[in-house]
Image (cartoon, helix red, strand yellow):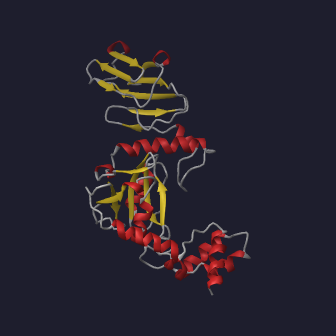
Amino acid sequence: MAEDKTDNIEWLRSRGIEVETPDDRKKQENLLSSLKSLQVGDAETTSFSYVYIAADDSVPLQLETAVLPKSLNTGDQLPLLLKEKFSQGSVDETALRKTAEKHFVGNMTAAPELAKKLTPQAIAGQGGSVEVFKLGEEVNLYLDAVGALKQLPRNNRATAFASKCGFGEVPFFGDMYIGRVVKNKNSDFSLSDADSSAPWLKDSLVYNLNRQAKENNQPFGSTGMDSEEISTIGGTEDNYSWAQTPEDIEISVPLPTKATKGRDCSVKISRRAVCISIKGGSDLELKPLFADIRPDESTWSVSDGHLVITLEKSREGLVWSAVS
């Protein structure tokens, strides 16, 4: 029986399926048990915060704190710390079978064998399993790797975070966590960071769109942006609207009246700022700009009741998520 179990583990691992042995789990359990006694401020420890996102929208976001010995302060430790959080619930056998068959499409001789070895009981025996979804350069979502197979409810707030980062409507299931990793170490992620207007969301959108544009123009999610949408992303602000191409940014400012002429407008363009003054209207300063421009190649004109400013990007092809 022991040889059969070892053979099963090696069979699953050879097919890319992560499997932990009882010895692996025992080591992790002992480590986690020792961590539970640590408190913020203990000698030779470090701590960081992260945020809990319940699948139930009525449950407020909650700040949580992890305390680690300094010897563990390398790499992302949240997958280990959150493993126990995702150990509850059972996998639906029918959903698991269908997923196994779909995964091995084109190799149906392997699927029946997988179905025998990859059972709800086998998965439950592994304890929790954590999947890391990279939202941006430094921010990750942490979810139950088999949440969909457990038929957990949708997590709409997690989906909203992914959408703001350029992934489209990615379906997530069950309770989740969000945290930050900076220079290969866990760093604080606060409740204010979980606000819908937090700066990291804009940074992550640009990071993902530029990465997406380099990777054969393939969208990240099933409803992610394609290359044409990326190149023309723009928006409407309080006093102006804007659009872009890979080469330039176009800003359109409505004039006070159709009688306003070019001589009534003053536009000063520098490398990282645009300052606008319109007779009879409000002054507008856009600074610092999202990225450098070429002032000598940028122009402005009056057309159809609007002041139209065209800024030439210094870095052609860079996607701007905002003007400033």
Whole-percent x, y for residue 14 in the image: 67, 68
User: At 30% from the left edge and 25% from the top edge, which residue is drawn?
Assistant: 284
Residue 312 appears in view: yes
Question: How many marks do you count on the picture?
Answer: 0
User: At 27% from the left edge and 58% from the top edge, which residue is drawn?
Assistant: 42
User: At 65% from the left edge and 73% from the top edge, which residue is drawn?
Assistant: 10
Whole-percent x, y for residue 43 in the image: 28, 56
Residue 91 appears in view: no
User: At 38% from the left edge and 37% from the top edge, which residue is drawn?
Assistant: 236
Position of 99 with respect to 244 (left or right) is right
Whole-percent x, y for residue 196 in the image: 33, 50
Quarter of the image with the C terminus is top left
Q: Is residue 281 or residue 108 the one in the foreground?
A: 108
**Residue 37, quarter of picture:** bottom left
Whole-percent x, y for residue 159 in the image: 43, 58
Which residue occupies the extreme front position in the image?
Answer: 43
Is 214 located above or below residue 51 in the figure? above
Is 192 located above or below residue 240 in the figure? below
Position of 302 with respect to 40 (left or right) is right
Quarter of the image with the N terminus is bottom right
**Residue 231, quarter of picture:** top right
Which residue occupies the extreme bottom position in the image?
Answer: 1
Q: Is residue 231 or residue 155 the one in the foreground?
A: 155
Position of 65 with respect to 16 (left or right) is left
